[in-house]
Structure formats: structure tokens, C-alpha cells
Image (spheres, rainbow, N blue to C red):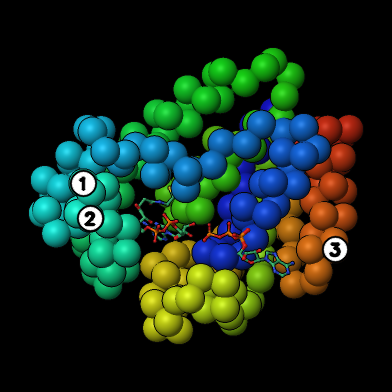
Amino acid sequence: MRVGLTGGVASGKSTVAAILAGLGAVVVDADLLAREVVEPGTPGLAAVVEAFGPGVLADDGSLDRPALGAVVFADPDARRRLEAILHPLIRARGAELEAAAPAGTVVVHDIPLLAETGQAERFEAVLVVDVPVETQVQRMVADRGMSRADALARVAAQATREERLAVATHVVENTGTREDLRERVTEVFDSLVSTGPTGR
Ligand SMILES: CC(C)(COP(=O)(O)OP(=O)(O)OC[C@H]1O[C@@H](n2cnc3c(N)ncnc32)[C@H](O)[C@@H]1O)[C@@H](O)C(=O)NCCC(=O)NCCS
Ligand SMILES: Nc1ncnc2c1ncn2[C@@H]1O[C@H](COP(=O)(O)OP(=O)(O)OP(=O)(O)O)[C@@H](O)[C@H]1O
């Protein structure tokens, strides 16, 4: 079964993905792949430098992620150019990892921009991790040391809560404790495995 997992920045997707992995799912993490495809020496990194200039490289030749983030989260055109380079590479690698998963496993694709990129129909079920914007911002500021303005810029670069909820087959609210989250995710996983995906 192919399951999509999405949610706004800092909503708790990685936490949900880790719980699902513990329950036996194979997780394909788009954020991780987005890092893999721009590792030093890759065609992905070369293409990014070609498009954005050597100013997005750190002294050791790796991608300077904060520098590139400052550019693309302030400029939607720049963001689209970056996405046009990286998304095909990320998708191709995700398909490879899925093909390598053992038969019969639940493969969960953790994709931050699933709603934005119109991918919902590719999945038998779509889990949306839902929190209020203020919770996203507080987590980015408290856990990642971001300024409030930078946190709000990331939120503004993404779909609204409503747009994401519109593609959900299962909503995972993450406004309670981590234990509440584990219970809800376990309930959703059990229902997917025992009764199959619903809602499509
Ligand atoms: C701009 C980059 C270098 C900033 O790196 P940084 O280490 O600060 O962030 P990281 O990659 O860990 O992403 C953290 C979160 O930011 C949000 N985010 C990342 N890219 C985007 C984007 N293009 N649009 C909206 N939100 C985004 C997502 O919620 C993601 O989970 C990086 O995010 C990137 O390469 N983005 C383009 C690739 C992409 O679209 N990734 C999203 C998953 S496919
Ligand atoms: N229920 C919760 N209670 C308190 N903190 C939480 C809860 N769920 C997640 N967090 C914390 O919030 C932060 C964001 O969670 P996580 O990294 O899972 O989100 P994400 O959606 O994967 O983020 P990103 O979009 O940046 O990849 C983390 O520091 C995580 O430990």
C-alpha cells in the first residue's frame, strides 16, 4: 500500500513518520532525499550552483542551506526555479526506494509539498498532520532557533491548512502530547492495515 504523509512545516511529520516506521512501515522521506540529491559532487548540486551562483556554497563545497533558504523563502520565483531542479530528482529517487521495499509493506512517502504539487491521487491514503499556524511558528522559533519572521516566511511558502485538509483521507491532529500523537497514529495505521485505505 502506498500512503502519502504531509503537513505544514514543523507540524510533526517526521515524528509521525518515525512512529509509522516503528509500526513496520517503510518511510521514504522527501526532505532527506532533497539533501541527498545535492550532496557534494552530485549533478543536483552543480545545477543549483549554475542557477543560483557560487554564493550558495559553503567554504567546504557543500550547499549552504541557510543561504539558499534566505533566497528562496523571500522570492517565490527563485523558489520555483529551485523546485524545478530538485523535485524531479527527489521523485526519481523516491520511486527507486519504493521499488526496493519488500512486497506487502506499507510504504509511506513523507512529502512536505504533497498538496502544493498535486500528488494526492498517487496515493491510496493521504495522512495530513494538522496543527494551528501559531504552533508551527512556536516550534520553529523554540526548537530551531529561527526568527519569527523566517518561520512565518516558510509558512507563507506553503499551502494553507484548509488546502492540505482538502486532500486528506486521514487527519492526524498534533495539538496534544507526543503520547496522544502515538495513539492516533497507531489507530490510523491499524485501520489502514486491517480494513485497507478508505476515502478514495
Ligand atoms: C531551501 C532549502 C535549501 C533550505 O534548507 P533547510 O535545511 O533550511 O530546510 P529543509 O530542507 O530541512 O526543509 C525544512 C522544511 O521547509 C519546508 N520547505 C522546504 N522546501 C520548501 C519549498 N520549496 N516550499 C515550501 N516549503 C519548503 C518544508 O516544510 C520542509 O520540511 C531546502 O529546503 C530545499 O532545498 N528546498 C527545495 C526542495 C524542496 O522543495 N523540498 C521540500 C520537500 S520535497
Ligand atoms: N505533540 C508534540 N508535542 C511537542 N512537541 C512536538 C510534538 N510533535 C512534534 N513536536 C516537536 O515539534 C518539532 C517539529 O516536529 P517534526 O520535526 O516532526 O516536524 P516536521 O513536520 O517533520 O518538520 P519539517 O517540516 O521542518 O520537516 C520537533 O522539534 C518535534 O520534536
Task: Give the amino acid type for the residue marked by disc 3 in the picture.
Answer: Asp
Q: Distance between the residues labelled 2 and 1?
A: 5 Å
Say left or right for 15 vs 64: right
- Disc 1 target residue: 61
Labels 2, 3: front one: 2
Residue at the (66%, 65%) spot, across then down: 130
Q: Where is residue 35 in the image (x, y as percent from the top left)?
A: 39, 44
Residue 52: quarter of image: bottom left
Task: Give the amino acid type for the residue marked by disc 2 in the picture.
Answer: Ala
Question: Visible in this render: residue 166?
Answer: no
Residue at the (66%, 71%) spot, across then down: 131
Q: Where is residue 162 in the image (x, y as percent from the top left)?
A: 58, 68
Say left or right for 23 vs 48: right
> Dot 1 surroundings within 10 Å: few (below 14), some, or many (20 or more)?
few
Q: Quadrant of the C terminus?
A: top right
Q: How far apart are marks 3 and 1 (CA)?
A: 42 Å
Q: Position of residue 150 (x, y in %)?
A: 39, 77
- Disc 2 target residue: 58
**Which secondary structure, mark 1?**
loop
Nearer-the-camera pick, 172 or 115? 172
Q: Are marks 2 and 1 in contact (CB under 8 Å)?
A: yes
Nearer-the-camera pick, 15 or 117? 15
Q: Where is residue 98 in the image (x, y as percent from the top left)?
A: 56, 25
Q: Which residue reaches farthest top?
A: 103
Residue at the (87%, 48%) spot, across then down: 187
Mark with earlier residue (2, 3): 2
Question: Visible in this render: residue 187?
Answer: yes
**Ligand 1 contact, mark 1 (Cβ < 8 Å):** no
Say left or right for 70 vs 93: left
- Disc 3 target residue: 180
Q: How many numbered discs?
A: 3
